[in-house]
Image (cartoon, rainbow, N blue to C red):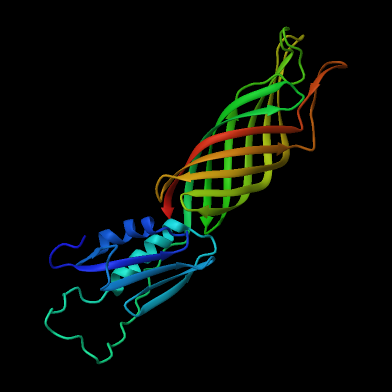
Amino acid sequence: MAAEGERRLGLRVQGACPSRKLVASELSPLLRGYALDEASSELTADVEDLGESYRISVAGASREVRDPARQCLERARVAGVFLALNLPSPEPPPAAVARSLAPRPDVPEVAPPPRAKAALELRPFAGVEVAPGAGAASTGLGLGASLRDGAWAITLLGAATTSTTPYQPNGVPPRFELRRFPFAALVGWEASLGMLGVGFELGPALDLLRFDGKAVPRPDQALRVNPGARLDVVLRVRASRHLAAELLPVVSWFPRTYLVGVEPSQLLAETPRFWLGVSLGLSYQVWGG
């Protein structure tokens, strides 16, 4: 309800992105001499979701803003600033004075403040991966960095995993251990649905492989590089403009396999072609946006 001396402002939001609650939360701290009131008939502000754009209107001022990525929180922020800047003077009209029949001069439009579209995000994560048919599983920790521009992003990531023993029988000492250090450069796209985000990341992958001989004569150690490809499905829940939790199902594929053996001719196993996994992490925006 409006306090004494404040004018009542109605808020009408059509569509789902942004929601009325989100617009009200961004607009309320910016109001001076006005108070949001559901029953207001003095003045009404409108925000209309048009799909890939949205329209903001109040007191004769109107602006349509394109936003194909449907960043609902950013829409609410821009709408709140635009509405607050274009509200007429908050002095209440005298009750005894009849409304003037002369046309009110147009209120000049004020553009929303410019914002930086590009943003840099840091993405620490923990994950687990399995190699189907190879009897191998590993856990790992990693860090990614994403340069985001609207709905698109370029991501570099690296991780370190625990040792595994692929294609070796259970119940006997392992003949060798395999440890992976996965790296990837990915291009991603994400659609925002309010506080939720859904997207994908795809690009080349590179595994640094370390082999450690165990229960074999003259055990040795070797390093190899294995190129491949990686696909992530990104599920994101935003806690704020800068922080989000992420769940990523992951598929990695490597066309080449390395054979592991004991000299002169005993073959022990080979490296898996496929790794399936899931990682859980955070995304924190450190710059831009």
Indicate whether 243 appears above or below 177.
Answer: below
Q: Nearer the viewer, residue 249 or 93?
A: 93
Report the residue that reaches farthest toward the bottom. 102
Q: Nearer the viewer, residue 49 or 140?
A: 49
Q: Position of residue 252 (x, y in %)?
A: 70, 37
Quadrant where the image shows the C terminus: bottom left
Residue 50 visible in the current orientation: yes
Which corner quadrant of the image does residue 108 belong to? bottom left
Horizontal side of 288 relative to 70 (left or right) equals left
Horizontal side of 233 relative to 16 (left or right) equals right
Q: Position of residue 160 (x, y in %)?
A: 58, 30
Q: Position of residue 178 (x, y in %)?
A: 69, 22
Report the residue that reaches farthest toward the top. 172
Q: Residue at x 47, y 55 (%)?
A: 119
Residue 289 visible in the current orientation: no
Report the residue that reaches farthest toward the right. 265
Which corner quadrant of the image does residue 132 belong to? top right
Q: Position of residue 10 (x, y in %)?
A: 30, 67
